[in-house]
């Protein structure tokens, strides 16, 4: 009996130790990840500023930063894994939609259609993404280190009110500008007859993507408004399972 109780408490202690070690590893990893991502987006911000100051135009800016942008935006897929394994308390779906729509913008729109790379709308979403990500990753970093300056917290939960619609406007305008090129070239499309007997029209797909912002974007925006009320105003919000 004594020995069972002792075994139990040893097991419990071991479990608690494991839990502590796991969360220490998770915190260490998240701190490293957030510092790396803050640095990556800062490098992007500086590269964009330097380009504009040197050339005096936004033409060619996307091409000059494309590799770095693709790298850091694609790496953000790790955030979906963070949610899935439960080391951050965020919905997989909300994060998945946010990250996948960005990756889609980068790889399947801006990177694939050279003719639109110099559009002002591309600069608009690049500026908005960069500002938002520097704020967001530095917020997570300082928060993990328990030294969060109030202005970063304020910026994280206020700037999105303007930045989110601006970013969406930049993204939608860019896709809209791409539509004529997609129709003309028939890129990423499959017409019948073909050996797979499959038909896919990228032009219509992009139209559906644009329309899908109507139901999806408000959900992300209201999620952030709820987070804002929780963090800045201390409201207790009971979330439905997302
Ligand atoms: C295949 C084709 C797909 C096409 C789909 C088309 C539909 C697209 C519709 C969507 C449009 C999106 C457009 C978008 O790209 C435009 C822009 O981004 S514009 C720029 C403005 N954007 C923003 O402001 C972004 C706001 N969004 C976010 O911040 C996040 O992405 C989001 C997941 C939406 C919300 O973040 P989260 O739920 O994580 O909120 P919190 O930041 O408050 O964090 C909650 C808790 O989790 C902890 N956490 C999260 N991540 C980390 C991390 N990396 N490290 C450490 N901790 C983390 C955080 O601290 C909180 O913890 P706690 O509650 O304990 O304090």
Image: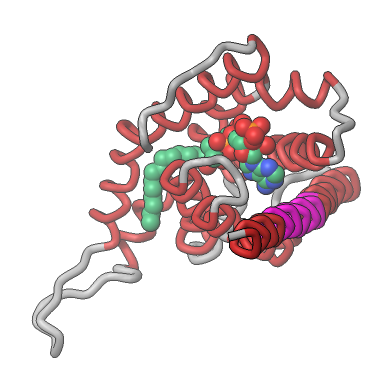
Tell me: 233 left or right of 215: right
Q: Is residue 32 magenta?
A: yes
Residue ranking furthest to the front = 1
Front position in the image: 70 or 65: 70
In the displayed structure, 202 sits above or below 127; it is: below
In the displayed structure, 72 sits above or below 190; it is: above
Q: Is residue 124 magenta?
A: no
Ligand 1 image-quadrant field: top right
Tell me: 158 left or right of 94: right
Residue ranking furthest to the bottom = 195
Front position in the image: 147 or 113: 147
Magenta stretch, main secondary structure, is helix
Residue 105: x %, y % from top left? 50, 53
- Residue drawn where x is 53% and y is 55% of the image: 80
Scheme of colours in the image? secondary structure
Front position in the image: 96 or 192: 96
Tell me: 141 left or right of 147: left
State the quadrant of the N terminus: bottom right
Residue 204: x %, y % from top left? 23, 54
* Magenta residues (range): 15-34
- Residue drawn where x is 33% and y is 71% of the image: 188
């Amino acid at each position: 009996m004594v020995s069972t109780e002792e075994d139990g408490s040893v097991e419990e202690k071991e479990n608690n130790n494991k839990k502590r070690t796991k969360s220490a590893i998770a915190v260490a990893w998240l701190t490293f990840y957030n510092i790396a991502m803050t640095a990556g987006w800062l490098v992007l911000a500086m590269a964009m500023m330097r380009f504009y100051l040197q050339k005096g135009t936004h033409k060619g800016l996307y091409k000059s930063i494309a590799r770095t942008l693709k790298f850091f935006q694609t790496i953000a897929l790790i955030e979906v894994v963070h949610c899935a394994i439960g080391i951050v308390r965020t919905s997989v779906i909300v994060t998945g939609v946010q990250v996948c729509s960005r990756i889609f913008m980068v790889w399947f729109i801006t990177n694939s259609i050279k003719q639109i790379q110099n559009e002002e709308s591309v600069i608009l979403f690049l500026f908005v993404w960069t500002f938002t990500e520097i704020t967001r990753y530095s917020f997570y970093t300082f928060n993990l280190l328990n030294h969060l300056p109030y202005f970063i917290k304020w910026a994280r939960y206020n700037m999105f009110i303007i930045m989110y619609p601006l970013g969406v406007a930049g993204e939608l305008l860019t896709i809209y500008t791409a539509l004529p090129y997609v129709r003309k070239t028939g890129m990423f499309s499959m017409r019948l007859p073909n050996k797979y007997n499959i038909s896919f029209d990228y032009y219509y797909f992009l139209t559906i993507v644009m329309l899908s912002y109507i139901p999806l974007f408000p959900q992300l925006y209201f999620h952030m408004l709820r987070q804002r009320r929780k963090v800045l105003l201390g409201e207790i919000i009971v979330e439905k399972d997302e």
